[in-house]
Image (cartoon, helix red, strand yellow):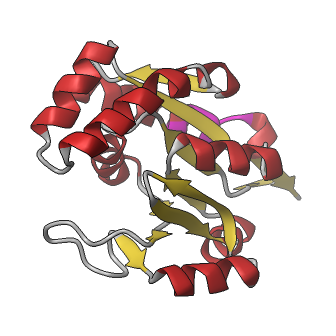
Amino acid sequence: MQYTRKGILFIISGPSGVGKGTIKKAVLPGVGALLESISATTRQPRGHEVNGREYFFLTPGEFSNWIQQDKFIEWANVYSNMYGTPREFVLKNLEQGHDVLLEIDIQGALQVKATMPEGVFIFIAPPSIEDLVDRLCNRDQDSPESIAARLAASEEEMTFMPQYDYVVVNDNLEDAVDRTRAIIMAERCKISNMKMGG
């Protein structure tokens, strides 16, 4: 008997500043055969970000055209910028049996859950709201106005945690990465994700 596996869609999500991107970057090399889906956004590149590597950077007009052409599996307006997950990359790789990892905001994750509930949804939580304040202030990427808006949204975002399959508290980065990897490996071993042939 031969065993093959369906492609699994893993979604890492949580409040802004909780460390989703850092966890994603640390998880990817350690699990193997996990493809990262690159989001599209209308925000300006930060630092050394490159178009097509961290994000597809689109103008608002280009983003609107993609929406009209149904090129996203989810999209959202987040802190005055648009973000979306390109449909073709995700569906094509899942059909070919490849696992795909999305790191997206909570609005986007809930949209994906509505259309692809078979995905594995992992909520990254801060140890406390105070810890989130420290992270947002110390990462030096956001204006004071942006930090205030993100913190105002964070408490509401935390109420969506019960809609996820797993929660990983990012109190220690190494532990959070290990727990996220363990979730991925366990899901790959589930009988429900196997295809059995003669």
Q: Residue furthest front?
A: 145
* Residue 36 is at least partly visible in this image: no
Residue 1 coordinates in the image, percent (x, y) = 82, 52
Image check: 41 left or right of 76? left
In the rendered structure, which segment of residues is drawn in magenta?
Answer: 184-190
Q: Residue 169 or 157: which is nearer the viewer?
A: 157
* Residue 188 is at least partly visible in this image: yes
Residue 136 coordinates in the image, percent (x, y) = 22, 35
Q: Residue at x 14, y 71 (%)?
A: 48
Q: Indicate whether 166 appears above or below 93.
A: above
Q: How many numbered marks appear?
A: 0
Magenta span main SS: helix
Residue 144 coordinates in the image, percent (x, y) = 19, 41
Q: Residue at x 84, y 51 (%)?
A: 196
Residue 95, quarter of picture: bottom right
Residue 165, quarter of picture: top right
Q: Is residue 176 magenta?
A: no
Residue 94, quarter of picture: bottom right
Q: Indicate whether 79 appears above or below 191.
A: below
